[in-house]
Image (spheres, rainbow, N blue to C red):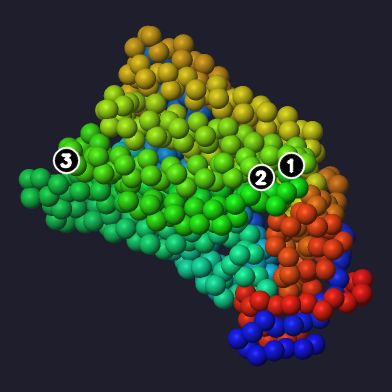
Amino acid sequence: MATTDQNKTKKVQVRRFKPEENPEKHYLNQEKGLWAWLTTVDHKKIGLMYLASIAFFFFIGGVLALLLRTELLTPAQTFIDADVYNQVFTLHGAIMIFFFLVPSVPAALGNFILPLQLGCKDVAFPRINLASFYIYVIGAIFTFISITTGAVDTGWTFYTPYSATTGTSVLMMTLGIFILGFSSILTGVNFITTIHKLRAPGLTWNKLPLNMWALYATSIIQVLATPVLAITVLLLAMERLLGIGIFDPNLGGDPVLYQHFFWFYSHPAVYIMIVPGFGIISEVISTFSRKIIFGYWAIALSSLAIAFIGFLVWGHHMFTAGQSSLANMVFSFLTFLVGIPTGIKIFNWLATMYKGSIDMKTPMLYAMIFLFLFTIGGFTGIMLGALAVDIHLHDTYYVVAHFHYVMMGGMVMAFLAGLHYWWPKMFGKMYNEFWAKVTAVVLFIGFNMTFLPQFVMGSQGMPRRYFNYIDQFQGFHQFSTIGSYIIGVAFLMMFAYMMHSLFKGKKAPANPWGSRALEWQVSSPAPLHNFDHTPVIIHGPYDYHQPMSEFQLGIATSHNGHHAGEPVTVEKSVTDKV
């Protein structure tokens, strides 16, 4: 084994790596017992604990959504009164945003997959990683206490002046969200440090999986934007407790100032939710198209561009709040501008699929659903960025439909693509492909039945958050409610075949998808410490133009002191197995 000067390319000898199929020892059957899980610092187990937690919150938020849709079956009161309705849609929004959408991909899937894709044994700060999970749980506990002490009825945005005067438990819920923010910040710091310092030798920035670029951009947003939310809810608490008047015009304050603070965080938070989904889609489309990703640097840098521009567009939520005409024009322009890097991603994904050998497995099916639904969400967002159109559509069901096409049609579908893609790596079991595809189709139909009518209702003037409505909208609401029931059935089907796979599913091979990504070059389920030896990265994660036998030569062992991301050259060995 030879090395050159520290500042030059290093030469190492590599041997062909062949992952063990169906290993007897892996991370799931080591350190058994509840206490071992609760005290683990293994990023994979922490990711699974996050996954179980967000699945629970998604279930709660979904049940609340079905209650809302059932109430809206008739123009008058159906089965709950107006006050309960306000509490239900507030809880639905707060739980789905803060406890499912924000942590789902970065904290759950990201925690599991990030060290595996970087070729390291764990994140940079394993104990802080576990602490961030417990902070998340503590924040959730305070939020659920608020439900029992007077459920909040302000909407998930907690707009002043109502949130400063209502008798409901705003303080307890905002305290829970304040605590939750620290979990997000710590996760972001951990991921940024890990990506910078713990990449495997040879894993330079131009070989970094696009999923890592997406998580990197997301982590930057988490670290910079989340403190603004903490300050905002802290000021709201002080307003309620001390009457400082920062949002009270009678004391020289301004309630619209709260909106500026809140949306300065919450619009970047939209990208905390969706940018990690972009990373998943890049991995899935390249794997199942059997092609090198088209426009690697365009996709990578567009993630950073979205993170940057996302901080500048918060004012488009406030076109009707009395801003100056100049401010409205600037925010409108920036809203159009942020659509450009997103469009770059979509066109590059389509170019990747062009003339590819597409294998329509379940993850790829969800990626295709994502492309269709998220594109609708993006176009309708551009329409809302147009000032004259937004004046008419603001606070109507059009906005509800747009938001759900972006968040559920985009982020949730990307999350499901990633969940099905990495499920064999997580649990070492294959789910039933037929039922998974049937469920995806049922979910697609139910989603469009639910939210397409809402575009029509909104364009005709149906306000959002209304408990009752005029008769002309009843047919749309009933069609939308039936669609929501279909969505519920689809998720029950998904839960059934996922649980079946855990107990009776076929054992998964190490690389069931034939991927070139680094995480698929180890056994399924993943080994306890990810890699027995430090891998040396020779080829990129999307080198599908090379046969697998040649590609495996790029995953090799090194026992010298390489640093993260250092370039290496290779002396190949004929050894078949490490």
Residue 352: mark in rendering: 2
- State the residue position of label 1: 356
Q: Is residue 489 above or below residue 153?
A: above
Q: SS at mark 3?
A: loop
Q: Is residue 342 left or right of residue 388?
A: right
Disc 1/disc 3 C-alpha distance (Å): 50 Å
Q: SS at mark 2?
A: helix
**Corner quadrant of residue 185:** bottom left
Image quadrant for the N terminus? bottom right
The answer to whether the residue labelled 1 contacts the one labelled 2, judged by CB atoms less than 8 Å apart, is yes
**Mark 1 neighbour density, 10 Å: few (under 14) some (14–19) many (20 or more):** some
**Corner quadrant of residue 550:** bottom right
Look at label 1 and name its amino acid. Gly
Q: Is residue 18 above or below residue 545?
A: below
Give the label, 2 or 3, closer to the camera: 2
Residue at the image point whose x is 65% and y is 90% from the top:
5
Q: Nearer the viewer, residue 304 or 193?
A: 304
Of callouts 2 and 3, which one flags the residue occurring earlier in the amino acid sequence?
3
Q: Is residue 236 above or below residue 189?
A: above
- State the residue position of label 3: 324
Residue at the image point whose x is 28% and y is 32% from the top:
387
Look at label 2 and name its amino acid. Thr
Q: Position of residue 335 (x, y in %)?
A: 35, 42
Q: Nearer the viewer, residue 546 or 412?
A: 546
Of callouts 1 and 3, which one flags the residue occurring earlier in the amino acid sequence?
3
Disc 2/disc 3 C-alpha distance (Å): 43 Å
Look at label 3 and name its amino acid. Ser
